[in-house]
Image (cartoon, rainbow, N blue to C red):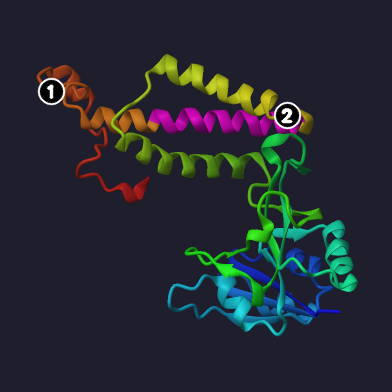
Amino acid sequence: MPKLSAVVIARDDAHLLRSAVSSVSFADEVLVVDSGTTGEVERVCAPFGARVLKIAVSGGASPIQWAAAEAMHDWILCIGINEVATPELVEAVRELLASGETDSPAHRARDVNVFMGRPLSRGRIFRRSSLRLFDRRRVEWSSLGTPQSVATAGDAGLLPGMVLHFDVPDAASAIADMNARSSLDAIEVALGGVALGGFAILFAAVLQFLRTFVGSGSFRNGFAGLSWSFIDAVGFATTHLKARELVAGEDPARRGIGDPQLAARSKGVPTLRGTDLRKY
């Protein structure tokens, strides 16, 4: 039976690290890669016998690529600090390795967000998966430092169970995340030089809500699905509102040039040219 190294990539706040390490503690080795946390990683990992390494990435290697090279065993199961492998996934990995049926070098698992205490596992939009279990001897590494294999195209190698994400567990964190992402997305939209009008933004946001909540089946996730769909639609609208502000700042006609009253009201409107975009 092949031995398994479980790799946990730890960064930022380590308050969820205990749950992540505990969920993969069945592995023959648990390797925690500390790539810049604010918590006491060694103290949290000690009860599980996990090996903690400070990241020393060089030559463009990603944390997971570097960790895979440092692991004791060839089969790697990887999760992040804000993630938890479900018991169903753990059992599936155990059975796969015990059976010796390891012809495929890589296997995927479903990624499911936990929001408002409920896994958003219902509906088409939430049927995402990513490569989680692989034989490091038989995979290639992408330019981004992620493992990839033609054997995992589509649903090939999809394991039972899920990896639960706790990145945005409540409405406050989801709104904060939405605001940050919309600022970045707005720059990309604004660089195209086209901004939607007010009614167009409203209409598009309503369509976005219906597409997520009804069309993609988020309504099957109950109140959490409703809240997620609403925040998603608000994020869409916020992106285009910010983009409109940026484009308006670039267009002299819209900034009120030649009209003192409009010019006075337009003071402070950010522009693409000469604007420090790092604040967005």
Does residue 38 appear in the picture of this structure? no
Under circle 1, the secondary element is: loop
Residue closest to the far left: 258
Give left or right: position of 122 versus 228.
Answer: right
Q: Nearer the viewer, mark 1 or mark 2?
A: 2
Range shown magenta: 222-241
**From what the image shows, is residue 167 above or below residue 142?**
above
Q: Residue 162: within the magenta?
A: no
**Residue beneath the point at 82% across and 57% down:** 86
Residue reaching furthest top? 199
- What's the residue type where badge 1 is placed? Ile
Judge the density around disc 2: few (<14), some (14-19), many (≥20) Cα neighbours within 10 Å: some
- Residue depicted at 83% across the width and 65% down the height: 93
Comparing 207 with 74, the one in front is: 74
Residue under numbered circle 1: 257
Magenta-span inclusion, residue 233: yes
The x and y percentages for residue 238 are 46, 31
- Asked if labels 2 and 1 touch by Cβ distance under 8 angstroms, the answer is no
1 or 2: tag closer to the N-terminus: 2
Residue 109 lies left or right of residue 181; in this view the side is right
Q: Please tell me which residue lies in front, 134 or 200.
A: 134
Q: Residue at x 79, y 70 (%)?
A: 102
The reply to whether residue 120 is in sight is yes
Q: Main secondary structure of the magenta part?
A: helix
Name the residue carrying label 2.
Answer: 217
Residue found at x 66% / y 53%: 153
Q: CA distance from mark 1 to mark 2?
A: 48 Å
Which image quarter is the C terminus in? top left
Give the secondary structure at mark 2: loop
